[in-house]
Image (spheres, rainbow, N blue to C red):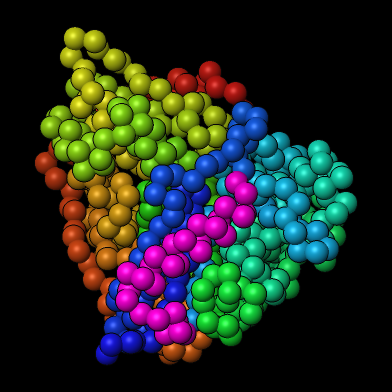
Amino acid sequence: MKNPACLLGIDIGSSSVKAAIVDAGTGACIGSAFSPETEMNISAPKPGWAEQNPSDWEFHAKEAIGIAIQKAGIPASNIMSIGITYQMHGLVILDKNGSVLRPCIIWCDSRAVETGNRAFGSLGRDFCLEHYLNSPGNFTASKLKWVMDHEPGIFEKTVTFMLPGDWLAYRLTGEKHTTRSGLSEGILWDFKKKEKASDLLRYYGIPSGLTPPLCETFSIQGRVSREASEAFGLPEGTPVSYRSGDQPNNAFSLKALNPGDIAATAGTSGVVYCVTGKPAFDKQSRVNTFVHVNDTPEAARNGILLCINGTGISNSWMRRMAGSLAYDEINAKASAVAAGSEGLLFIPFGNGAERMLNNLNPGASFENIDFTRHTQNHMFRAVQEGIAFSFRYGLDIMNSMDIIPSVIRAGHANLFLSPVFTQTLADLVSVTIELYNTDGATGAALGSGVGSGIFQSASEAFGNLKCLKRISPGTEQERISTAYRRWEKALNTKILNSDRV
């Protein structure tokens, strides 16, 4: 077919905005692009802060959409539906005119940690875990409370607050919505009462009406307005029919929909996401539970999420320090060094408070540097091994919740393109890793096909999903395990000397 019916997926990351055009007939991605070519700016006005301007997401979304359509070789009129996925936990606040009042406080910003800790203590640990399956922590509700306390002039003008994906959907359709999954990622969903987290909102003094109305994850949530059609180059009236935070969406992209399915990512941050059919929580709230994309009243689906801030960003930092070599070259250099990096260790926690470390920020560091032995190649390998070690540390927490993976699914992208990282992780946790031909933007496009009724089910949408590679535990498990024990000891020493954010 020369001009197939197509689906558009938009992925608002913290490094770039990606767009994917999917052929609705085959489920295959036929054109994709990202913008900018270099990483998008993250502003840090103070230590531990992280902000981005939503206007930058809109600009780069327009750029990426235009290039993706051009690469697909189709007219924009072939786009039948739009899906949006986005960096989780961000805070976008709007005034009565729908204008953004301040830069978005994004996921890795640490300023609201103590705000959430106080709420956890005041409302009670048992109450919070029973109702929210999480501590209020450094999530969206706590970030808005921080604005209320520290920027009262801005809060007084606030009419609506949104997640990043909610905001882009608003820019496309003029309609304000969020989802139950979205509310849960902000700790704004009461799992026990099955409603907005009224007790936490009341404690924070946040009017309930500031949250957007609810819509279903898979549903027609609005249609492209005339103004947006002209600005984005998309057909007026095209439905926006799916939205999800990036990690539930990544799991959806990998067809992780049923209890026991496990998905992982290793982009700017690292994530392991396990689907469960029951409410579950970690007593220390080091991993977090959110409403999954396919949750229904008849069949509960939640996602238990382990997030590690300092993963891919550590690898990109090392790349910049080495003169911005191509990642393929870095991976080759890392592979030239034996497993264990000849004793060189890297602790990758240099991107704000780490939830799995009880919101400590121990910082990043190389350990055991030997000037006579260690080269740049050793540093490349130690960074990738250190990131894999951080995954193992977090998976041990999930193991304590009876989450024992046998297979981990991931997209064939980012750090999972590195043989060192992928093999080290397989060896450390003694599981097979399966890599698939998908990414977040492609998954969002397929989700829009489900939400608009083009596909009758998720199973139909994933007809083109293929496993590209399987990595099984290898022969270096003992050597890697020994290195991990040394790494864990070094991390524990740093934790003893670190400050709580």
> Residue at point 40% right, 22% down?
365
The image position of residue 409, as x and y in percent, is 31, 60
The magenta segment: 52-80
Q: Which of 30 and 132 is in front in this view?
A: 30
Where, quadrant-wise, is the N terminus in this rendering?
bottom left
The answer to which image quadrant residue 336 occupies is: top left
The answer to whether 446 appears left or right of 329 in the picture is right
Q: Which of 488 and 338 is in front in this view?
A: 338
The answer to which image quadrant residue 380 occupies is: top left
Magenta stretch: helix, strand or loop mostly: helix
The answer to whether 378 appears left or right of 115 in the picture is left
Residue found at the far front of this picture:
230
* 78 magenta-colored: yes
> Residue at point 78% right, 44% down?
147
The image position of residue 383, as x and y in percent, is 31, 32
Where, quadrant-wise, is the C terminus in this rendering?
top right
The answer to whether 462 appears left or right of 495 in the picture is left
Total numbered labels placed on residues in the image: 0
The answer, for residue 331, to whether it is visible in the render is no
The answer to which image quadrant residue 27 occupies is: bottom left
The answer, for residue 474, to whether it is visible in the render is yes
The image position of residue 350, as x and y in percent, is 48, 30
Q: Which of 17 and 480 is in front in this view?
A: 17
* 262 magenta-colored: no
> Residue at point 42% right, 85% down?
78
The answer to whether 268 appears left or right of 357 in the picture is left
Compared with residue 494, is residue 19 higher up or lower down, i.e. above or below?
A: below
The image position of residue 408, as x and y in percent, is 31, 57
Compared with residue 5, is residue 279 higher up or lower down, i.e. above or below?
A: above
> Residue at point 39% right, 49% down?
37
Residue found at the far top of this picture:
372
